[in-house]
Structures are given as C-alpha cells and as structure tokens.
Amino acid sequence: MTDSTAALLARPELALADDALVLSHRLGEWAGHAPVLEEEVALANIALDLLGQARALYGELGDEDELAYLREERQFRNCQLTEQPNGDFATTIVRQLFFSRWQELLYGQLTDRPLAVKAVKEVAYHRDHAEHWTLRLGDGTPESHERAQRAVDDLWRYTGELFQPLEGLTVEGHPVDWDTLRVSWDGYVADVLDRATLRVPESPRQSGWRAGAGRQGLHTESFGRMLAEMQHLHRSHPGARW
Amino acid sequence: MSSDWPLWEVFVRGRRGLSHTHAGSLHAPDAEMALRNARDLYTRRSEGVSIWVVPASVITASSPDEKDPFFEPASDKAYRHPTFYEVPEGVRNL
C-alpha cells in the first residue's frame, strides 16, 4: 500500500461514504423481494438517498468508481453493522433504526459541512420510517414481535463500533462529541424499543474478538460476497456505461 | 400480504393555494404508514406541500348506473352556467 493510499484510507469521510454505499447496496438487494410493493419503493428510496450521500463524499476524495468498485474488502472502512445481511424484514428495519439514528445524530453535529446539513433531512426520514416499523413489528403479532426481538439481539453486538471515534472528524476545528452522541443514541433506542415492547439486550456491544474492526478494514463473512456482486460488472467491463 | 392491508386514497396538494388533488392509491397497515408510503410513492420529486390519506372504504362513490340523473341535468337553463362573466386576464387556477 502506498503512502497516499494509506492516507486516503484513514480519512474519516471515507468511512462515512463506505457506510452509506454498503448499506445502500444492501437495501437495494430488496428490489424484487420486498414483502409489499409500497415497502419496496420505500427501501429503494432510502437506498438512493444513501447512494447520493456516498457519491458526494467519494467525490471529495477521488474518483467515485475507483473508490466503489476497485478497492479490496480490507480497504473498506464501513462499520460492520451496515454490511450485515438483510435477513428478514425485521432485521432490515432494526439495522436501519440503529444506523439511521446514529447517522442523524452524527450528521446533526457536522454543522459546518454542507453535505451533512443536506443529508440530515433525508436521514431523519429514514429514521422515522424505521421507527414506525419497529413499533409495529415489536407491538404487532407474536411472530413479528419474536422476529423483531431476535433482530435487536443479533445486531446489538455491532452497535459498539458506531461510537468509536472517527479520527480526524471535526466540527469547526473541534472533535465530534462522541460521548453525547452515544448517550443520545442509547436514550432514543431504549425509548423506541420500550414503546415497541422490545427488550434492550444486556449482552455486550462487542463480541469477544472486538467487533468494531470494520473501521480497520476487518469485515464479517458475508461482506466479501456482497462486494463481489457489487463490483463484478465494473471489474469485468471496465468503464462500462449505461 | 399486501392484500391483507386496507386500501388508501392519496390526495396531494401541489402548492399553497391549490386544493388537494387525487394522486392515486396504495396499501398500508394504518394511516401513519399510509402517509409515509404516499410520501415515497407520490411526492419524491418535490410535487407536494401537503398529503391527505383517506381509507378507500369510507368513500361513498356515485354509481355508473346513476350517471344520467347525476351528471346530465337539462342544459336549457342557461342561468345555471356562469358563462356571463369575463375572466380577468392573468387569473389562474379559477
């Protein structure tokens, strides 16, 4: 790895862009498979918002196609939460709730970045959509409740990584206030889960080997397959255009 | 699954000063979700400033069989039609 690549991979903007791109791709996987047409459109809209955010951020760092399609798995800096497979609808919704609330709080702090100021409105809607579904699934039928609780329990271990400070991410020269962010996130998530009759897990937020390595380029098993599918076209036909 | 959900009619107000106009319909489990689905389906390109959703089941519609008594009044009473007024120039949405 050259020095310039190492410097690029250390940019906090790259982590934010990778979060958005990877989650966008995951949501896009619902196309043609969502439980109802209305939700398919809703998830695709969220995916497109995230894709737009990723493109804007990549544009600040270099060539967007190169960054999205020609990096190896270990060079992606997204948090592991975003790459988790869609699972059932409850898993997708809980993943979105956890991520969108974090993104809303973080982007809300980045008041000196026009990109974040614009994105935070989109993200507030993503969070609202996920919140409404969490309430309905948690407080719905016994089956939807069970699936929602399982999703919360399964994804909980990936939430610790969200609050690891992204080195170099500043607001008007000061570092982001990660403690405030975590406290707000905890309070919000506990409130939504409570209203949805779901339990906040007591299990740790990091698994034994420290989940949280997504920011260091260590990803979970399914990410490689997702990346292969996402990058296949560009790698097979460099420069292909619609 | 979609068929288990009630049908909602969506009305969108394009901009301030206009009335809500029927935009289409969709399925949703309840009013709050219907509003969100309507936002995603019908207002994604900044078309609206306000959305109404109405359960399709509460709409009482005229029947096609009653078309004539409903919609074809005798047209010989010219005074019923406001055709004697000049519309001032520049007035839109009248």
Image: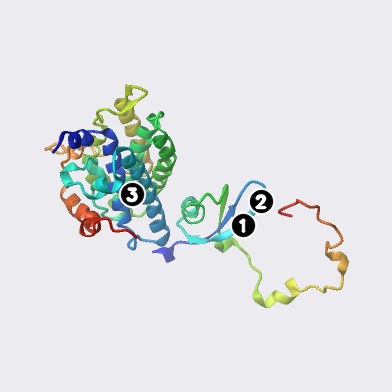
The amino acid sitting under disc 2 is Leu
Where disc 1 sits, the SS reads strand
Q: Name the residue under label 2.
A: B18
- Number of residues whose C-alpha sits closer than 10 Å to that of mark 2, classed few (under 14), some (14–19) or many (20 or more): few
Q: Do the residues labelled 1 and 2 touch (CB within 8 Å)?
A: yes
Q: What residue type is labelled 1?
A: Thr
| Residues at marks 2 and 3 touching, judged by CB atoms closer than 8 Å | no
- Looking at the rendered structure, the secondary structure element under dot 2 is loop
How far apart are the two marked residues, 2 and 3, measured between alpha carbons? 36 Å
Residue A205 visible in image: no
Residue under the point 33% across and 46% down: A96
For this view, does A1 lie left or right of residue A231? left
Q: Position of residue A12 (x, y in %)?
A: 27, 33
Judged left or right of residue B48, residue B40 is left
Which mark lies nearer to you, 3 or 1?
A: 1
Q: Name the residue under label 3.
A: A93
In the image, residue A52 sits, relative to residue B10, either above or below, namely: above
Residue behind mark 1 = B21
Residue B78, image x, y percentages = 87, 68
The quarter of the image holding the C terminus of chain A is bottom left
| Disc 1 to disc 2, C-alpha distance | 9 Å
Residue A165 occupies quadrant: top left
Q: Which chain does the numbered disc 2 sit on?
A: B
- Where is residue A188 drawn, in percent x and y? 36, 35
Examine the rendered structure and indicate whether residue A101 appears above or below residue A223.
Answer: above
Question: Which chain letter matches label 1?
Answer: B
**Labels 1 and 2 positioned on one and the same chain:** yes
